[in-house]
């Protein structure tokens, strides 16, 4: 268990840490290339939707053949994508490198694939906690990598900084050896329920639909804030270090938030935990946008939002495992995460589009508040008890 947790946590630390700092590149790249913020935002939006789509298929492969091959291929793709970002001279090429290639790479080096390994190798009594540990590691990656990326940009230039990150991404290759699995047992489980049967069961089950709806909101909020907060603060006259410090604080406090969410998921109702997280996000955003902006208010916002940032991840994935089992966990987690990434696409793209049209981020902040209330409502009635199957092959949802 500890080998899986340590190697999985380090891989997520790298993959999530690198991507959380992409907002720091918005200003230097658009300024030097003469692009609009919408151009940069579109590439990151493509990245998120590609990540979601590719995550479904990488999850299928990882469930059937193990995570090792998926992680190795995607780590190499991550390095190529980051290097390609440095060489992109048009918004279209940038969307292919930062968008398509990096998005595909993230699908195989982040939560869905790693959580599948955890689900298969950690007992149900410790599963939510173990997922919280891994999510906390990803959060620590943000705390560690965002200031590092800011330092690299300041000292190497934005293009050479991307080359340095490409080298770091390759560290995931040797770490993947720690996630090699004996897939014979999982193959036997998968034979008892086919992929098609598992999908019909999940998509016909109302609680799965509600989890997908809530996760859409998670993606919308965190990616909008993560990418556009530095520019929002600069527009309000804050120094660049305030934004990088804020993103680092989000990562630091998210270490505690995700761990606590995973720990609480072993003891409390996971859907109730999710509802609490989403409603508190809306409360924190309301306070932030109606409070005069200062470095102190930004740091308080970052700390509070950090506690709520990726704390949705452990209870969401642990609920899926509890309802449907672990045989197709990476795939089902991939579908729920795809909904998250559709929300991410909308959040980052609308942030850039509406800013260019109105000169303000206000409309997207208001949308984030309303969506948080919506997500709190749809997660409340989710039923986390194991699904009742009439036969091992039935794959039919119990009426709910």
Image: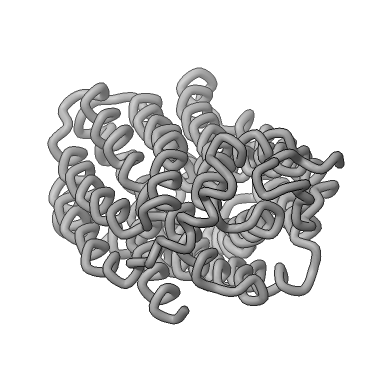
Residue at x 60% of width, y 70% of height: 127
Q: Nearer the viewer, residue 206 or 225?
A: 206
Answer with the quarter of the image where residue 273 lies.
bottom right
Q: Is residue 383 above or below residue 203?
A: below
Outermost residue toward the bottom in this view: 2
Residue at x 78% of width, y 47% of height: 390
Q: Nearer the viewer, residue 242 or 139?
A: 139
Residue at x 57% of width, y 61% of height: 306
Q: Is residue 121 left or right of residue 171?
A: right
Q: Is residue 342 visible?
A: yes
x then y, percent, for residue 344 = 52, 37
Quarter of the image with the C terminus is top right
x then y, percent, for residue 118 = 50, 67
Residue at x 48% of width, y 52% of height: 112
Outermost residue toward the top in this view: 357
x then y, percent, for residue 30 = 28, 32
Q: Is residue 219 visible?
A: no
Q: Is residue 386 left or right of residue 255?
A: right
Q: Is residue 244 left or right of residue 386?
A: left
């Amino acid at each position: 268990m500890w080998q899986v947790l340590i190697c999985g946590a380090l891989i997520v630390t790298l993959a999530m840490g690198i991507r959380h700092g992409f907002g720091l590149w918005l200003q230097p790249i658009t300024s030097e290339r003469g692009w609009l913020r919408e151009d940069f935002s579109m590439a990151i939006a493509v990245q998120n939707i590609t990540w979601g789509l590719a995550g479904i298929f990488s999850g299928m492969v990882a469930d059937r053949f193990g995570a090792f091959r998926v992680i190795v291929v995607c780590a190499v793709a991550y390095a190529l994508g980051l290097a390609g970002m440095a060489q992109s001279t048009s918004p279209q090429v940038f969307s292919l490198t930062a968008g398509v290639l990096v998005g595909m790479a993230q699908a195989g080096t982040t939560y869905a694939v790693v959580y599948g390994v955890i689900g298969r190798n950690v007992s149900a009594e410790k599963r939510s906690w173990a997922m919280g540990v891994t999510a906390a590691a990803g959060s620590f990656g943000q705390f560690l990598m965002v200031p590092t990326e800011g330092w690299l940009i300041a000292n190497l230039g934005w293009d050479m900084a991307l080359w340095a990150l490409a080298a770091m991404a390759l560290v995931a290759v040797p770490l993947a050896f720690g996630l090699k699995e004996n897939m014979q047992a999982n193959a036997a489980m998968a034979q008892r329920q086919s992929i098609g049967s598992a999908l019909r069961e999940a998509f016909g089950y109302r609680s799965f639909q509600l989890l997908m709806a809530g996760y859409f909101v998670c993606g919308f909020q965190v990616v909008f804030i993560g990418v556009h907060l530095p520019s929002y603060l600069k527009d309000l006259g804050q120094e660049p270090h305030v934004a990088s410090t804020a993103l680092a604080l989000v990562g630091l406090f998210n270490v505690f938030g995700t761990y606590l969410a995973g720990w609480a998921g072993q003891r409390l109702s996971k859907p109730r935990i999710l509802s609490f997280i989403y409603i508190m996000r809306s409360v924190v955003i309301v306070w932030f946008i109606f409070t005069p902006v200062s470095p102190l208010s930004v740091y308080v916002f970052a700390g509070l939002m950090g506690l709520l940032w990726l704390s949705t991840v452990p209870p969401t994935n642990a609920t899926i495992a509890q309802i449907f089992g672990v045989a197709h966990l990476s795939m089902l987690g991939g579908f729920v995460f795809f909904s998250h990434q559709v929300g991410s696409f909308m959040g980052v793209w609308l942030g850039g589009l509406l800013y260019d049209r109105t000169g303000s981020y206000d409309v997207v902040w208001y949308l984030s508040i309303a969506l948080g209330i919506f997500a709190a409502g749809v997660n409340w009635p989710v039923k986390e008890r194991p699904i009742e199957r009439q036969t091992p092959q039935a794959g039919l949802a119990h009426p709910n």
